[in-house]
């Protein structure tokens, strides 16, 4: 049994932020468990063509770790470089066990800690921080005949770098954020590209720009970097007013702009009709791309909408609902992740023998999206209702860390064993979240998105300003917790 003060599951930005904050509090006795054979999370795992961030990089970065980005929206290789820079700066490789997949975690009442079973042995820790991330478990729909296809097939999350798709007949299943980056990146290199779209997304132009050598030098000056972050943050934060409070503003400043952009870039009225959503902008994730529509207009690209979707998959390709046989060399699954009901992919057994899966049977829920009654000393990074559709996810992660570190330091300072949110506090918080959610476009925008759990509750998003969440996470409330 390997014993530590804290265990962190996952080495992406969530795990890195947790490790940095623990070190700054003087807690060096921790271990990061990473299931892959490399560290870094999303931006080291996702290496599909065109992969890039969709939030401005000066904001989509750790606040204490500025970086001289080469462009406003960094591409995957630069994000990987940044990630490894943070890992190396804080010596996190020496504190990480890679190829260590968590199989189950169980609260040990006698030891006042968590027993963690992995393929690489057993661990025990007083504190457990799950930072596995909501976009880490890919989903591939079980279409009839899915496994009969004799060509190459892989999910964007597991891109096969050794497969040469150039000159091949390719299908991409899905039309969300990853697909919107892959399609323009490969459309001019393949023989045929068939895009199977269940629901169109609203698309807005991507306001990207390269930074000059002088601008990059200025980004290395902390006050200037912080000023740019501040400007970007408040510009993005204003979107919440439209997403939550004003359908008229949403149409005026976003949806009408998206319609004009679609009309400008797609001249074919039939294709334009297929690409026009029938729900309010913002209900699903908005795509930022200036190259997607031109790629879909290419002569070698065919868009299949829901009327011509997948009937079945066979050995040589896909048979559509209209009876067309589409012969293929490669199927790319861009079908998303189990980001709501599958927030944590392994069994979690709490202090009374109850599983987290049982507690979440109706829908995932947690106080501040972070902690649960009956699961002491367990903290979930990017847990239920901590997603943010308008700004940087790292801002929310850092806000969660304020709460998590506050809990841990209070126990350590007072030499206590456990901290646990009360059922009343969690219920009050959850009721507030879903009451506020009813006012948002994610709830009443007329779409069915991955933001919702199977129960119909919007689980992925926080229903308000990100600074509101930071305020809630910063003001630790002793009356909401049981410390023993």
Image (tube, helix red, strand yellow):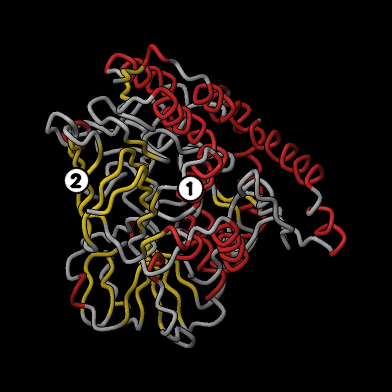
Residue 324's disc is none
Q: Position of residue 108 (x, y in %)?
A: 18, 37
Is residue 237 shown left or right of residue 361?
right
User: What is the total number of numbered labels drawn onto the structure image?
Assistant: 2
Circle 2 crowding by C-alpha within 10 Å: few under 14, some 14–19, many from 20:
some
When asked about the image quadrant of residue 152, the answer is: bottom left
Q: Residue at x 49, y 82 (%)?
A: 190
When asked about the image quadrant of residue 67, the answer is: bottom right
Establish if 210 lies above or below 346.
below
Establish if 150 lies above or below 157.
below
* Circle 1 residue: 19
Residue 80 visible, this orientation = yes
Tags 2 and 1 touching, CB below 8 Å: no
Frontmost residue, 81 versus 252: 81
Q: Position of residue 341 (x, y in %)?
A: 27, 42
Is residue 25 shown left or right of residue 442?
right
SS at badge 1: helix
- Most distant residue in the front direction: 415
Q: Residue at x 30, y 57 (%)?
A: 139
Q: Residue at x 21, y 76 (%)?
A: 314
Frontmost residue, 220 versus 341: 220
* Circle 2 residue: 347
Frontmost residue, 223 versus 123: 123
Q: Position of residue 333 (x, y in %)?
A: 35, 66
Q: How far is mark 2 from mark 1, CA to CA?
A: 23 Å
Is residue 318 shown left or right of residue 77?
left
SS at badge 2: loop
């Amino acid at each position: 049994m390997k014993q530590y003060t804290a265990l962190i599951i996952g080495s992406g930005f969530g795990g890195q932020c947790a490790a940095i904050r623990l070190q700054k509090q003087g807690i060096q006795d921790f271990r990061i468990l990473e299931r892959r054979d490399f560290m870094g999370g999303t931006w080291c795992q996702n290496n599909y063509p065109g992969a890039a961030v969709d939030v401005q990089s000066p904001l989509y970065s750790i606040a204490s770790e500025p970086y001289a980005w080469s462009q406003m929206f960094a591409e995957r290789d630069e994000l990987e470089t940044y990630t490894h820079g943070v890992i190396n700066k804080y010596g996190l490789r020496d504190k990480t066990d890679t190829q260590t997949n968590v199989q189950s975690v169980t609260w040990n009442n006698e030891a006042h800690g968590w027993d963690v079973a992995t393929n690489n042995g057993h661990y025990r820790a007083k504190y457990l921080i799950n930072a596995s991330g909501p976009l880490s478990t890919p989903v591939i729909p079980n279409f009839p005949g899915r496994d009969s296809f004799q060509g190459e097939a892989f999910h964007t999350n597991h891109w096969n770098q050794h497969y040469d798709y150039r000159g091949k007949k390719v299908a991409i299943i899905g039309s969300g954020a990853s697909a919107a980056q892959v399609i323009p990146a490969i459309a001019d290199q393949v023989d045929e590209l068939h895009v199977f779209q269940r629901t169109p997304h609203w698309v807005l132009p991507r306001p990207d720009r390269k930074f000059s050598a002088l601008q990059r030098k200025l980004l290395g000056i902390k006050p200037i970097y912080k000023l740019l972050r501040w400007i970007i943050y408040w510009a993005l934060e204003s979107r919440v007013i439209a997403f939550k409070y004003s359908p008229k503003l949403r149409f005026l400043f976003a949806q009408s702009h998206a319609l004009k952009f679609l009309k400008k870039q797609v001249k074919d009225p039939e294709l334009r009709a297929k690409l026009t959503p029938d729900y309010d902008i913002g209900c699903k994730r908005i795509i930022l791309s200036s190259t997607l529509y031109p790629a879909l207009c290419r002569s070698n690209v065919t868009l299949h909408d829901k009327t011509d979707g997948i009937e079945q998959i066979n050995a040589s390709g896909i048979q559509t609902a209209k009876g067309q046989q589409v012969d293929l060399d490669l199927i790319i699954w861009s079908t998303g992740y189990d980001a709501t009901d599958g927030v944590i992919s392994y069994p979690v057994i709490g202090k009374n023998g109850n599983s987290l899966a049982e507690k979440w049977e109706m829908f995932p829920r947690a106080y501040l999206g972070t902690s649960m009654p009956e699961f002491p000393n367990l903290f979930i990074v990017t847990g239920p209702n901590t997603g943010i559709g308008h700004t940087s996810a790292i801002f929310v992660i850092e806000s969660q860390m304020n709460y998590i570190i506050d809990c841990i330091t209070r126990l350590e300072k007072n030499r206590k064993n456990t901290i646990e949110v009360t059922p009343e506090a969690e219920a009050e918080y959850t009721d507030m979240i879903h009451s506020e959610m009813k006012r948002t476009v994610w709830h009443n925008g007329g779409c069915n998105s991955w933001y919702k759990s199977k129960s119909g509750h919007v689980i992925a998003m926080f229903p308000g300003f990100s600074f509101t969440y930071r305020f809630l996470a910063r003001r630790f409330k002793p009356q909401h917790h049981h410390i023993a």
